[in-house]
Amino acid sequence: MKIKGIKKCYSMKNVREVAVRSGLDFSIRRYVALMIVFLSGLLLAGLLYRLELWYIVLVEVVGAAAIPPLIMYYYMQRCESKRFNDVDIYLHQMAYSFQRYPKINVALSDTIKVLTGNMRNVVGKAITELECSENDRVYYEALTIIEDAFPCPRIKTLHKFLISIEERGGNYYNSLEVLINDYDRWVKRVYKYQKDISQVKKNSVIGIILGGCLSTASLLISSILGNSSGIDMNITHDGLYQAVSTIFIILNILYFLIIQVQCNKDWLDSERTEEKVMRDFKLVFGESLRAVKMFSLCLGIGGIFLSVVLAFGVHIMVGVIGLVVTLYLVTVPAINKKQAFNRLKEDVYIAFSEWLRDVVINLYEMPLQSAIEGTYESCPAVMKQALGQFIYDIEESPTDVRPYYTFMNEYGILDISSTVKTLYSVSELESDNTDRLLNSLIRRNYEMVDKHEELSNADSISVLKFSEYIPMIFVALKLGADMLLIISNYL
């Protein structure tokens, strides 16, 4: 839930539910106490800046409107962090328990002992379903309860693997080691990301406080100049000062709120919906691309002609405006396509890593072609079409290397191309050397995911860190307006 969901924050029922899920106590008394403290701080700020009554009332109204979202997002952040921690415990405990004794019911019984809160309740429901149901798909139905409550691709992968071993048997130790190592790296990355975001939030609060202190410098300067020159340098009665100071406080409130909203993350499910992925896919690779290009060309020619007519027939500025509008309309499809392609590349990085992990797990039990075919049903949407063509090509020519060289090459991601070429070598090796190559594939996959996730997190953090300077921009604008008033009064 982002900005568009802020209206839900004004419901006490919603706030209470999120607070309970986060493991924190919620009470109206505490809620009111937080409102009083926050509004008292804004009142002190208004008095410090010597605002008039009506401006103080405006600041208090904005502050009162911001409090429910601030409290809601605080609970939401705590809730998401707890959910991630619960999933961390669940994944590792389930994997270790199953590794010790390969039975799902035993692994669930061991895992529930170390869980708390909502995750414990959900796992308890899964155990009850497992014990009471006589359906042939009892494992799927029981574990789906957990997957629905905690939508995480890694939980689904683990469940799929555990059900496969429970039903068919086979060697599972190496495959579980692959999953456990993947969980370790994922958890480490997310905890580091959480720590970085927490630091950004702390720095933002410090920036607001320092900005508030620095912005009072104009009052001090006007007082010193007034005492030394004998001229009344008081600017607080000026309407411009009152308006600028009020806007300054309100901007800081909104900045603080936006930081809380943007720092709220869903740590479990980073995948976009299949509908959004396919919409971008059609935009980039769809059959209508030629028609869009022709439309843009015709629009550009017509727009330029019309702009020239308007420039000579009406006014040259009208023609310039028409030309600018035409250029914008012509470039919009290309811009949208580029943005969609970048989103797809991000999806492909995540999807390919998950797909390769499933392939490696399958390779411990089956040959390469079967291992690849076995991943089609659970394959992420962004890879579905390419994987279908890939499977068809290797079925037609099992020994041909070309399908491996062309798989996913439309995205131009060198890490993926190199990894797929290595995957082809599995079919050429003897069984004695397969483990060595699989370990190499696992390492390559981990390195690719780590590099991509670290770069993605670094980009996100860099944007958030840049926002730390925004309070100083507010300060500069306020001091500039105040100094302008001081100079005009002095002159």
Image (cartoon, rainbow, N blue to C red):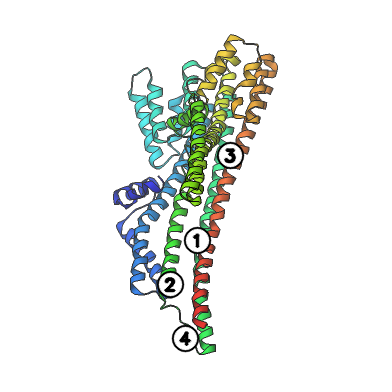
Q: Do the numbered discs 4 and 2 sit on residues whose CB atoms are within 8 Å? A: no
As drawn, is 50 to the left or to the right of 218?
left
Distance from disc 4 to disc 2, alpha carbons, whole Å, reads: 17 Å
Distance from disc 2 to disc 1, alpha carbons, whole Å, reads: 27 Å
Which is more toward the observer, 356 or 97?
A: 356
Mark 3, other Cα within 10 Å: few <14 / some 14–19 / many ≥20: some
Q: Earlier in the sequence, mark 4 or mark 2?
A: 4
Distance from disc 1 to disc 4, alpha carbons, whole Å, reads: 35 Å
Q: Earlier in the sequence, mark 3 or mark 1?
A: 1
Which is more toward the observer, 202 or 48?
A: 48
Q: How many marks?
A: 4
Q: Circle 1 is placed at which residue position?
A: 205
Q: Circle 2 is placed at which residue position?
A: 240
Q: Amino acid at mark 1?
A: Val
* Image quadrant where one finds the N terminus: top left
Q: Is residue 10 above or below residue 152?
A: below
Q: Amino acid at mark 3?
A: Glu
Q: Circle 3 is placed at which residue position?
A: 453
Q: Is residue 294 above or below residue 474?
A: above
Determine whether the residue tagged by mark 1 lies in a helix, strand or loop.
Answer: helix
Distance from disc 3 to disc 4, alpha carbons, whole Å, reads: 59 Å
Q: Is residue 218 above or below residue 335?
A: below
Q: Amino acid at mark 4?
A: Asp
The numbered disc on residue 232 is: 4
